[in-house]
Image (tube, rainbow, N blue to C red):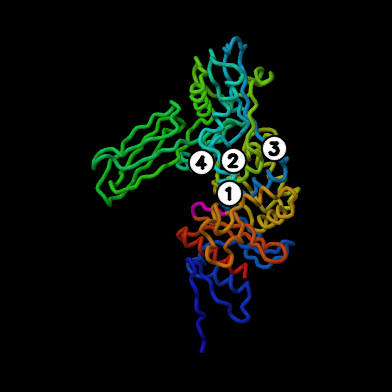
């Protein structure tokens, strides 16, 4: 008579007790082949740090990796950029300065710095310098302009984003996605993740409009409220929209009177104009007036002659490791795309997606040794469903970075199970709590996890798990992936 093995469910993870003679391969196969997960397309690989394959299923086939794509741009930046690398925002005078007056335009030339935002750049948020409050860096930039002695500008304030190309939005991103922070436009300048923070809550009574406010208000946006408050317990359907390419926004839908409300992060179409408008307001609070309009450009020739002169201000970004940290730890899309275009500008011929991807491809093939047919990348963040990478390519990249002399920032930024970051709630209560260091990934019908399982002795186990073409609810799929990792680590 056959005995059924009992199954222990721990925080939603399926953890089968060991059966005599049952191999790691058998345990993983059982999880991959269990309904409804057997309908998904799975790519899985597990190796030791020397590259010896311990488990593989479809490991050399191409899969859509979602945010595991970020491993490529951050590894490329970690390996290629010097330790002291910083992006730079420069301020130029478009005319002579006399007795505190700039007779001409004030030009803000962006070098792709994404760190003008409220964010922490380490898991120890109380460490000195780990976090920036909202506007602290923009205020420091305005202080630097004030320190030059300028008190009045007769011309315009211009956001010059010509260090990057004029293609702000990736052609593979969905139209709806580009309204939100995770699909923010990518230009030479950027602030607050190129988004405004919209807070909504029920109105003062049923049938009244919802209460809606947004920050920062830099004088560019028109928001029309078309919403309605409904009875307690009814459906909340509020959503936000924008005329394509414009600054005309509207809200529509309903908000239940019992709703607690929330804050959304809505993308703006012209990052260079947004930055210039925000700096204008900050300069005004510092006592510097601007008589002309707020403008933007991506024309590299518009202020070419002006940029040949010495800048009034050179304002550096945070360091290389801080540029990488939000991309891996909290899966920040916009940072990834800004970094990708920066790589294209530094090591290619232009600050564009095409040039950044070419830099990544050369790095993967020439430095890491990834087969040229093992990847086809479309963007830096993984928001595009056109990205294709094999699990074996990710495992090779991860082994390469584990041995790289400039690995520290890359490894520090990767989420760790049970700690601050995108693995904060995963593997808690299992033997792998605190021992899985990996990058998450999730878009429609796709979930992925690639990284390291730390061991007491020897180097780490290296794994990549990608599930494509599934209709399993997201939380259920994440728990199954975690169960597979637990079996890998046993």
Other residues around mark 4 within 10 Å, as few (<14) / some (14–19) / many (≥20) = many
Mark on residue 337? 2
Could you give the CA–CA distance between mark 3 and mark 4, rounded to whole angstroms? Answer: 26 Å
Comes first in the chain, label 2 or label 4:
4
Q: Which region is colored magenta?
A: 440-444
Could you give the CA–CA distance between mark 4 and mark 1, rounded to whole angstroms? Answer: 28 Å
Other residues around mark 1 within 10 Å, as few (<14) / some (14–19) / many (≥20) = few
Residue drawn at the location 51% of the way across and 89% of the way down: 1
Could you give the CA–CA distance between mark 3 and mark 2, rounded to whole angstroms? Answer: 17 Å
Comes first in the chain, label 3 or label 2:
3
Could you give the CA–CA distance between mark 3 and mark 1, rounded to whole angstroms? Answer: 23 Å
Q: Mark 3 against mark 1, which lies toward the viewer?
A: 1
Q: Mark 3 against mark 2, which lies toward the viewer?
A: 3
Q: Decide whether the magenta segment is chiefly helix, strand or loop.
A: strand
Is 425 placed left or right of 56 in the picture?
left
Residue drawn at the location 48% of the way across and 39% of the way down: 178
Is 258 placed left or right of 453 in the picture?
left
Q: Name the residue under label 1.
A: 124
Q: What element carries label 4?
A: helix
| Residue 214 lies in the magenta stretch | no
Is 476 placed left or right of 112 in the picture?
left
Q: Name the residue under label 4.
A: 183
Q: Quadrant of the C terminus?
A: bottom right
Camera sees residue 336 = no
Camera sees residue 70 = yes
Comes first in the chain, label 3 or label 4:
3
Other residues around mark 3 within 10 Å, as few (<14) / some (14–19) / many (≥20) = some
Could you give the CA–CA distance between mark 2 and mark 1, rounded to whole angstroms? Answer: 25 Å
Q: Mark 4 against mark 1, which lies toward the viewer?
A: 1
Near-viewer residue (270 or 434)? 434
* 445 w.r.t. 456: above or below: above
Q: Mark 3 against mark 4, which lies toward the viewer?
A: 3
């Amino acid at each position: 008579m056959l005995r059924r093995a009992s199954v222990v469910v721990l925080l939603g993870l399926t953890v089968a007790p060991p059966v005599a003679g049952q191999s790691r391969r058998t345990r993983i196969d059982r999880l991959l082949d269990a309904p409804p997960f057997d309908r998904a397309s799975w790519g899985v690989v597990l190796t030791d740090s020397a590259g010896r394959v311990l488990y593989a299923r479809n490991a050399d086939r191409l899969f859509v990796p979602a945010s595991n794509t970020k491993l490529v741009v951050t590894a490329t930046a970690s390996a290629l950029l010097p330790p002291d690398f910083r992006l730079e925002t420069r301020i130029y005078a478009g005319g002579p300065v006399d007795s505190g007056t700039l007779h001409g335009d004030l030009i803000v030339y962006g070098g792709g710095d994404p760190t003008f935002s409220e964010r922490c750049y380490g898991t120890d948020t109380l460490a000195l310098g780990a976090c920036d409050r909202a506007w602290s860096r923009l205020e420091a930039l305005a202080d630097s302009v004030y320190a030059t002695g300028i008190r009045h500008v007769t011309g315009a304030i211009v956001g010059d984003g010509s260090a990057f190309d004029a293609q702000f939005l990736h052609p593979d991103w969905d139209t709806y996605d580009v309204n939100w922070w995770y699909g923010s436009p990518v230009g030479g300048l950027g602030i607050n993740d190129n988004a405004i923070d919209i807070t909504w809550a029920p109105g003062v009574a049923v049938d009244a409009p919802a209460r809606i406010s947004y920050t920062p208000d830099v004088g560019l946006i028109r928001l029309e409220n078309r919403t309605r408050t409904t009875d307690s317990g009814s459906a909340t359907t509020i959503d936000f929209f924008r005329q394509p390419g414009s600054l005309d926004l509207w809200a529509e839908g309903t908000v239940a009177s019992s709703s607690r409300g929330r804050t959304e992060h809505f993308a703006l179409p012209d990052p260079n104009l947004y930055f210039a408008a925000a700096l204008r307001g900050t300069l005004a609070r510092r006592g510097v007036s601007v008589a002309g309009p707020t403008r933007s450009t991506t024309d590299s020739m518009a202020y070419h002659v002006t940029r040949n002169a010495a800048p009034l201000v050179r304002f550096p970004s945070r360091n290389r490791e801080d540029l990488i940290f939000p991309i891996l730890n909290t899966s920040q899309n916009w940072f990834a795309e800004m970094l990708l275009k920066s790589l294209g500008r530094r090591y290619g011929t232009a600050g564009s997606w095409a040039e950044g991807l070419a830099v990544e491809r050369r790095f993967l093939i020439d430095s890491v040794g990834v087969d040229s047919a093992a990847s086809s990348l479309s963007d830096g963040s993984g928001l595009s469903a056109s990205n294709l990478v094999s699990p074996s390519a990710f495992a090779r990249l991860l082994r390469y970075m584990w041995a790289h002399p400039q690995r520290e920032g890359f490894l520090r930024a990767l989420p760790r199970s049970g700690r601050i970051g995108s693995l904060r709630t995963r593997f808690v209560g299992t033997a792998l709590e605190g021992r899985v260091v990996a990058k998450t990934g999730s878009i429609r019908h796709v979930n992925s996890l690639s990284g390291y399982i730390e061991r007491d002795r020897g180097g780490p186990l290296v794994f990549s798990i990608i599930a494509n073409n599934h209709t399993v609810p997201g939380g259920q799929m994440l728990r199954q992936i975690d169960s597979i990792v637990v079996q890998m680590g046993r």
